[in-house]
Image: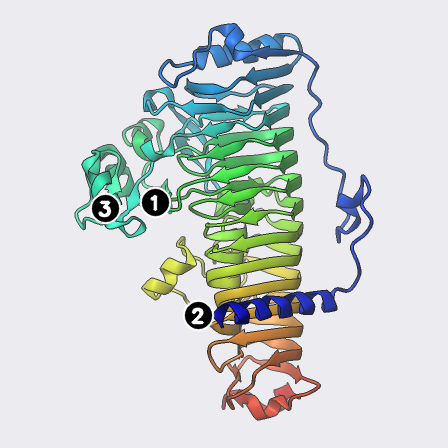
Amino acid sequence: MIVKKITNLLLAAAVFTVGCTEKSAPPRTENSLYETIEFEMPVIQEPQIPDYSVSITDFNAISGGIEINTEAFAAAINAVTEKGGGKVIIPPGIWLTGPIELKSNLELYAEQGAVILFSTNKDLYPVIKTNFEGLDTYRCLSPIHGKNIENVAFTGKGVWDGNGDAWRAVKKSKLTESAWKNLVKSGGIVNAKGDIWYPSEQFKRGAEGSGDQNVRDDISTKEEFETIRDYLRPVFVSIQNSKRILFDGPVFQNSPAWNIHPLRVEHLTVKNLTVRNPWYSQNGDGIDIESCKNVLVQNCNFDVGDDAICIKSGKNEDGRRYGIPCENLIIKDNIVYHGHGGVTVGSEMSGGVRNMHVSNCTFMGTDVGLRFKSNRGRGGIVENIFISDVFMTNIPTNAISFNLYYGGQSISEMLAEGEMETSSELLPVTEETPQFKNIKISNVTVNGAKQAVFLQGLPEMPLENVEMNNLFLKAEDGFQIIDAKGVKISNIKLITDKDVAMQIFNSLDVDVNELDYDYNAADAIKINGSQSKNITLSNSHTKLETYTTIGPEVSKETVKF
């Protein structure tokens, strides 16, 4: 009986989505990638690599995962660089290495069966000045790194493994009891509460200092940072200030912190990747695309410990000082399994994000599906976001979430600890005030979530011009709309476990049309907040005024049926 109900539900969602489609898909052509993009999108340039190749075995690389091959990788890269560029072939085998420095006009081709395993010897990764979580700071050298380079490609079907377990702290709550006991027995140190394991005393000392999330703000010199080196986990792949970068085919996994971090890259192509991290990995993001321009992420699979596909542009004063937005992005045909967010914007977005297309993505068991996050102090403008044809199942928290009170935790953790703020305190608008506007979301199917839609702006800077249409949503709770302006919601099929379909608080110019819902309670729609104004509720087959409760502070004239 249960299987039959689920089958009927999915069939209904499919019929609903097909029936609501505004136009059929265009015929496939070489330029079909760009034909349905809602903004002017430049053609993304891929790297052109000279036709010359060497193998790491030409330079005495030894497979087996015992011998270190750092010099062999460096020699192979230098050999093709001296010829003006080319391909470095990594054959099947287990190739242990230290850090790899990227150079221009380089293709790293990892053949099927190749595993590039990075050493856990932290002496190989010196403390350097870099950028992490949107801030200029010191971290350990990334296992794979390059600055000011052009025409670089990662290809093949091999595996790049960052050996991240040697770097990360682990929360007891994220492991089974037996796994926790085995971890503690392996070495390291546990905090006084007994709920966090650290790889070393040095890491513990670094974690216990003052900081902005994972960036220490109470020390400033390289010498001070070197005393907590173990704590300064690097991103796995760091590429900065570069052009024409391609990732096509390999697996990237087990990163010390974020997995892939392109920073200020122009013409970035990411396709056919598998990106993996243990689900317990702190800051184990999939890819963090920061202040990049002209980007494609397509046909990738993510199963990670934090946000999967992340769009960023610097944090607070550092981000505003650089002032480089993330812009012109196409994200389509991807699958996300575990992760804190499927596609995420923020919370580091102080340089702005604009012109982003997301389509035909599937999120299964992801903490949040579509996740937009920021807070006061960031500044920056997120605008011109177009999302369509997204399919989600078993979302533990919010299927669609805009949270401008983000505090650095996953939504699951914030809900568990009661830390979701809903403050309506009005503050002055300054350069530190984040703004989210001009967002369109259509043709979304959700089969299972705690909450279908959570829209929360700031009292001084509401979410603005958000359109949502053609949605099929099955969740415990329906809509929450807080501090928003210019919200249009139409053609929605909503199934919830509770009687409340929608709550509106301190929002204006809200138009809800054709919300199909099993109305059983007089307060299925709740409108509160003295700032709520100009709200229109209409439905062709239900008298919504019968099922709407309006708070005493809201003028009756402000709601129209």
**Whether residue 21 is situated above or below residue 158 in the rendered picture:** below
Mark 1 surroundings within 10 Å by alpha-carbon count, few (fewer than 14), some (14 through 19), many (20 or more): few
2 or 1: tag closer to the N-terminus: 1
Which residue in the protein does label 3 denote? 178
Where is residue 403 shown, x and y percent of the image?
A: 49, 62
Q: Is residue 427 visible?
A: no
Of marks 3 and 2, the one in the foreground? 3
Which residue in the protein does label 1 denote? 211
Q: In terms of depth relative to the viewer, which is nearer, 458 or 152?
A: 152
Of marks 3 and 1, the one in the foreground? 3
- Gap between marks 3 and 1 measured at Cα: 32 Å
Which residue in the protein does label 2 denote? 422
Of marks 2 and 1, the one in the foreground? 2
Q: Is residue 414 visible?
A: yes
SS for callout 3 = helix
Identity, as a three-letter code, of the amino acid under mark 1: Gly
Identity, as a three-letter code, of the amino acid under mark 3: Ser
3 or 1: tag closer to the N-terminus: 3
